[in-house]
């Protein structure tokens, strides 16, 4: 049995995958040192490689997880179920007052389900985002988590609008801005001294891991061919996600002409991103980071759950159309890339706003 200080609010943070770590760090920091609060960090182990997890904890200055569930990889059902099975006894034993979940990964929805069923109040950080594409596993995770959450912290007004339309009572919804940008603002100065030996001044930085892009051999082959074409004009630097690397090998494809790297640490990737001529990606978070940095972003998806990156930011959706990628890349190379502005409340203080609301 865990003896907690009397009259203390016991806050759990549940994280599991790479994009969660830069989101939890600012909230942990903002709550640290507040009177009458204790925090417990739970890592589900959805991502377990050192360079997908541990290095992020180190660079973001986070404490080691208090609880590690070591669930590892699996099908969606298996991974989600395993997280639920391993998390439930921890929640029963330690009795958190509030559980905070982050983003849209399987760890997010699994934790929200466990806590909602145990009657523990849930706060969802990065609530309200919608791609309106239910073939994306993350869209299912977002819809379910938002239905279960008691506090919904949105990064932008479109999130509030989506939640309103889905019938979430407005008093549960708080537009606090983008916590991921908090980490970016804090660590950007450290990223200035990073770099890769021999990299030319102008380059395209590429990331690719969405199941829709990498799990089908014909689609993945088409994208790699487009990237080889990009590489003729601009060196392509491609830190490859483990899933993508595995698929390239399984399908007998090659990305040999590109500068393929292992996944990079947070600070190294941020440095590369901030100096890139263009970023080509199918990630969600990178669409936001490039918008903040003012770096052109060409997104290899037909839709985005982060529309402000298109309406206000530097993001252009090119889908899987090689012609569109080609024409947008020519615009960038001709110095005519889309200019953007930073969305409201993406100012490095979202974590503090969340802490203030919870303390209230
Ligand atoms: C997950 C998230 C996705 C997020 C991405 C960031 C879900 C549904 N998806 O996708 O939203 O953008 O993380 O990376 O939660 N693997 C390793 N080492 C690791 C982790 C994974 O080798 O540390 C490999 C395994 O082969 C695994 C595969 O990557 O099967 C996929 O990992 P998984 O966590 O299932 O999903 P991601 O594709 O990483």
Image (cartoon, helix red, strand yellow):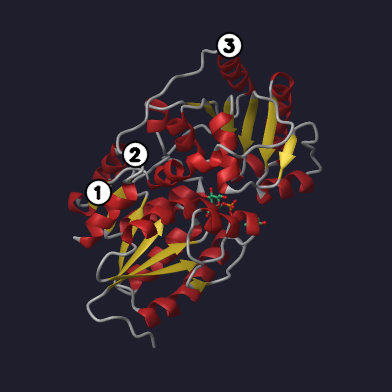
Q: Is mark 2 on a helix, strand or loop?
A: loop
Q: Where is residue 27 in the image (x, y as percent from the top left)?
A: 36, 56
Mark 3 and mark 1: Cα distance apart in space: 41 Å
Q: Name the residue under label 2.
A: 347
**Mark toward the start of the polypeptide (2 vs 1):** 1
Quadrant containing ligand 1 reads bottom right
Determine crowd level at label 3: few under 14, some 14-19, many 20+ residues with C-alpha closer than 10 A: few
**Residue 131 visible in the picture:** yes
Q: In the image, which is nearer the foreground, mark 2 or mark 3?
A: 2
Q: In which quarter of the image is residue 148?
A: bottom left
Q: Does any atom of ligand 1 lie closer than 8 Å to the CB of label 2?
A: no
Residue shown at 28% from the left, 38% from the top: 157
Q: Mark 1 points at which residue?
A: 174
Label 2 with label 1: CB-CB less than 8 Å: no
Residue 95, compared with residue 282, is above or below; it is below
Q: Is mark 3 on a helix, strand or loop?
A: loop
Q: Where is residue 60 in the image (x, y as percent from the top left)?
A: 49, 54
Residue shown at 32% from the left, 81% from the top: 4
Q: Where is residue 316 in the image (x, y as percent from the top left)?
A: 49, 25
Q: Name the residue under label 3.
A: 334
**In this rendering, position of residue 342 left or right of residue 266:** left
Q: What number is the disc on residue 345?
A: none
Q: Is mark 1 on a helix, strand or loop?
A: strand
Residue shown at 60% from the left, 19% from the top: 329
**In this rendering, position of residue 200 left or right of residue 167:** right
Is the C terminus in the top left, top right, bottom left or bottom right quadrant?
bottom left
Q: In the image, which is nearer the foreground, mark 2 or mark 1?
A: 2
Observer-nearest of 353 and 142 = 353
**Residue 167 visible in the picture:** no
**In this rendering, position of residue 243 left or right of residue 344:** right
Observer-nearest of 40 and 47 = 40
Mark 2 and mark 1: Cα distance apart in space: 16 Å
């Amino acid at each position: 049995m865990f003896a907690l200080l009397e009259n203390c609010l016991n806050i759990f943070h549940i994280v599991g995958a790479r994009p969660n770590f830069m989101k939890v760090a600012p909230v942990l920091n903002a709550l640290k040192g507040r009177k009458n609060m204790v925090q417990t960090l739970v890592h589900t182990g959805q991502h377990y490689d050192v360079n997908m997890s541990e290095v992020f904890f180190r660079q973001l200055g986070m404490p080691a997880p208090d609880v590690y569930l070591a669930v590892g990889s699996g099908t969606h059902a298996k991974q989600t179920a395993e997280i639920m099975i391993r998390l439930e006894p921890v929640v029963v034993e330690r009795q958190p007052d509030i559980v905070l979940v982050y983003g849209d990964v399987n760890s997010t929805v699994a934790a929200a389900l466990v806590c909602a069923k145990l009657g523990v109040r849930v706060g969802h950080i990065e609530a309200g985002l919608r791609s309106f594409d239910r073939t994306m596993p993350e869209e299912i995770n977002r819809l379910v988590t938002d239905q279960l959450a008691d506090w919904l912290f949105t990064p932008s007004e479109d999130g509030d609008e989506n939640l309103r339309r889905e019938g979430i009572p407005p008093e549960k919804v708080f537009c606090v801005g983008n916590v991921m940008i908090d980490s970016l603002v804090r660590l950007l100065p450290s990223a200035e001294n990073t770099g890769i030996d021999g990299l030319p001044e102008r380059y395209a930085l590429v990331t690719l891991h969405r199941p829709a892009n990498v799990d089908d051999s014909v689609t993945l082959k088409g994208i790699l061919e487009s990237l080889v074409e990009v590489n003729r004009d601009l060196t392509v630097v491609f830190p490859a996600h483990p899933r993508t690397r595995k698929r390239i090998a399984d399908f007998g494809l090659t990305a040999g002409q590109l500068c393929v790297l292992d996944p990079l640490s947070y600070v190294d990737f941020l440095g590369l991103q901030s100096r890139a001529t263009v970023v080509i990606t199918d990630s969600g978070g990178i669409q936001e980071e490039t918008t903040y940095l003012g770096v052109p972003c060409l997104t290899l998806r037909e839709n985005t759950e982060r529309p402000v990156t298109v309406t206000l930011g530097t993001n252009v959706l090119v889908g899987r159309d090689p012609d569109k990628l080609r024409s947008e890349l020519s615009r960038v190379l001709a110095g005519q890339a889309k200019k953007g502005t930073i969305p409201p409340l993406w100012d490095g203080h979202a974590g503090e706003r969340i802490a203030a609301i919870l303390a209230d």
